[in-house]
Image (cartoon, helix red, strand yellow):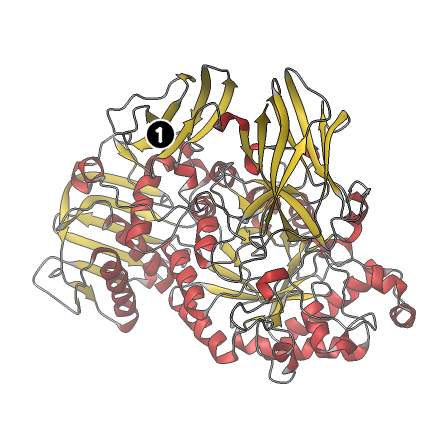
Amino acid sequence: MTRTHPPRILQRLGAILLSATLAGGALASERPLPLVPMPASVEQSQGEFVLDARTPLLAGNEAERNVARQFAVFLEKGRGIAPKVVARSRRGGIRFRLDPARGGDPESYSLEVTPAGATVTAADTAGLFHGAMTLLQLATLDEADPIRLPAVRIEDVPRFAWRGFMLDPARHFWTVDQVKQVIDAMALHKLNTLHWHLTDDQGWRVEIKRHPRLVEAGSCRLPAGDGAIDPASGEPRPYCGHYTQDQVREVVAYAAQRHITVVPEFDVPGHATAAIAAYPELGSIDTPLQPTSEWGVFPNLFNNEEATLAFLEDVIAELVPLFPGRYFHIGGDEAVKDQWQASPRVQARMRELGVSDETAMQAHIVHRLAGFLERHGKRAIGWDEILDGELPADAVVMSWRGTEGGLKAARMGHDVVMAPVSALYLDYLQTSSPHEPPGRPATITLQQVYGFEPVPEGLEPERQHHILGVQANLWTEHTRSFERLQHHMFPRLAALAEVAWSPQGKRDLESFLQRLPVQLQRYRRWNIGYATTPFQVDVELQEEGDEAIRVALSNPLDYEVRYTTDGSAPAADSPRYEAPLELPLPATLQAAAFFDGHPLAPARSWSWDAESLLVRSDEQLDACRGRDALRLRLEDDGPADGERAIFDTDIFYPCWQWTAARMDGVAALKVRAGRIPYYFQLAHDEPHRRFEPARSAHGELDIRAGGCDGRRIASVPLPAAPGADGFVELEAPLVRAIRGRQDLCLRFTGDTRPQMWVIDQVTLEKR
């Protein structure tokens, strides 16, 4: 079903002209040079070097020429010019120079720009490439033609060796070309590790020739609800995707050319539904399984039999040659042990092995696979649950449940990658805007990403070298399109890049936000989609009356806000927002965030009158449980293609609250409701799921005044199903007149499985 109001995702932002103040030759002296991530050392001087299509790119040996050619390709994509790579020239140019005598970190480089030319120098091709990316940023400071590079000397070295991003194609699949786009974007941010999450309950995504059913049966699933039906034929339409081994080699080689290492993940012993669906003998129960379109924590685990462990080693043995990097991720997270506990076969095998409990059993598997990897020249890395049992001596811990696991591992002498859910999960919403696409509960803002410190406070100096680096993770349960993927990634990945690369003392949020508008300009040049929601203006209706309202405006990143009330678009000379606005009804308001006199995103518009104040959308309603709510932004299951309705709901207790509703003269409530599949596996959190028992065949919509424990003021039976458009309009007359302001609680009765009712819009109807 689709909504009748505007789509949630804005069109890509148009060009922003910042050349007047951000051109290299006229950069305001008090402003930092707009580079992301900020280099370790930047010394600006007077003058500039003019770069155009005739500028020679000077390179001697083949390694230097490769980097020069890569620079030329990126420059052509971003600025439309393609200078030639030559061995020598009389004309001042840009030299790419490898100097092994420099020594030091292989990713370090120096870059010097003078009026006579520019030189990038490094000891290793990785450093030379990173220097070329910084030079590319200098070439995209402004819109000027020809390009003017500011005179500068940069000495740069990364803070952390692991600067990672995790891409999940198991939940929603990404094509080879899309993965390459992600790799290009990572390279532009000096990120160097792509963690590729290739297996999960919802899909097996990589060809294993010795076990072909992994992709034959494990790489397809039926989407939930209407999304599983072909609208043309009415037949089931599975969602499929996997990478051939040749495609994996292609991606790995493409990444290596950009000095990015691809780390595969084969998750064991949990997140195994797709693999067990393909080979049921691998499982711990006899019930046949299928790859699923449900999300959450599943109970399905690989069993502990010798044949299964040999199978796991077979898979790893085929994957190892495809990934020449040092690390191999074996998962280990969210392995609910219920099936092991209930399985006589698993328990008998544990006794045979002398294993004391299920946690020790998982540790036994981790040890076995880590040893197998070590014999094949690899080093095992796993999620921090592998700390629950005895850890292999050389294992690396990826700390996702917080930083505590990483701190513990480092003190035990293990290397650590910090990737905490609290700061670096990019599938969490990044603003409170109603224009955010579907995502997980809570909000992880750009400021939270930027403010994360990978080295835990209190970690002893002699242990700090165990913090290999930092990684952002993007799980894709709710990320159905590449546009949404990019929305979640950017600009937060730019913040991560600076955390990972720049010296701790160089990190400064105010400086970053001054440099960010130019980075957005680069994104548009490089065809990188990004979220405009952090650059839009949000509105809060603080007070409402019969004659006037009071509203507050804000920008999530605290850029200045300018507004109009006459229907015109805000401009640089429009009033600047300073304090809440008192607006007589009817009112129209437009507002945009500005930087240096230019809007950072299209203006948002609002209109209010007496009728509109009687309406609230689901985004404007509160969750009844407040901070305890597990509120998700969920997408409907249909139509199969195109835009779908999106709903905010608490999946543990589907209940909505209209806080301080003005009830004088209200005779009824009209509720527009939809219904979506309840596609969540909750494992041990299942007891926390609540619903009110139905009192009739299909349940009711109940409305209470004074909160969820207040008296019931209206109730209406629910139909067996929504209408053809996926919605139902429910008219709920009040059983008694209510006066003044009331907190209205709206909830549906009946079990939320297999489908749950959700609110789209609520209207107060006057007598």
Tell which of 255 and 660 is nearer to you: 660
The answer to whether 325 appears left or right of 754 in the picture is left
Looking at the image, is 135 positioned above or below residue 209? above
**Residue that badge 1 annotates:** 591
Q: x and y percent of residue 144 in the render?
A: 15, 46
Q: Is residue 402 visible?
A: no
| Res 591 quadrant in image | top left
Tell which of 592 and 560 is nearer to you: 592
| Res 96 quadrant in image | bottom left
Tell which of 641 and 408 is nearer to you: 641
Amino acid found under the numbered disc labelled 1: Ala
Residue at 85 percent of width and 64 percent of height: 340
The answer to whether 433 appears left or right of 135 in the picture is right
Residue positioned most to the bottom: 210
Residue at 38 percent of width and 64 percent of height: 258
Residue at 44 percent of width and 63 percent of height: 260
Q: x and y percent of residue 27 in the render?
A: 21, 36
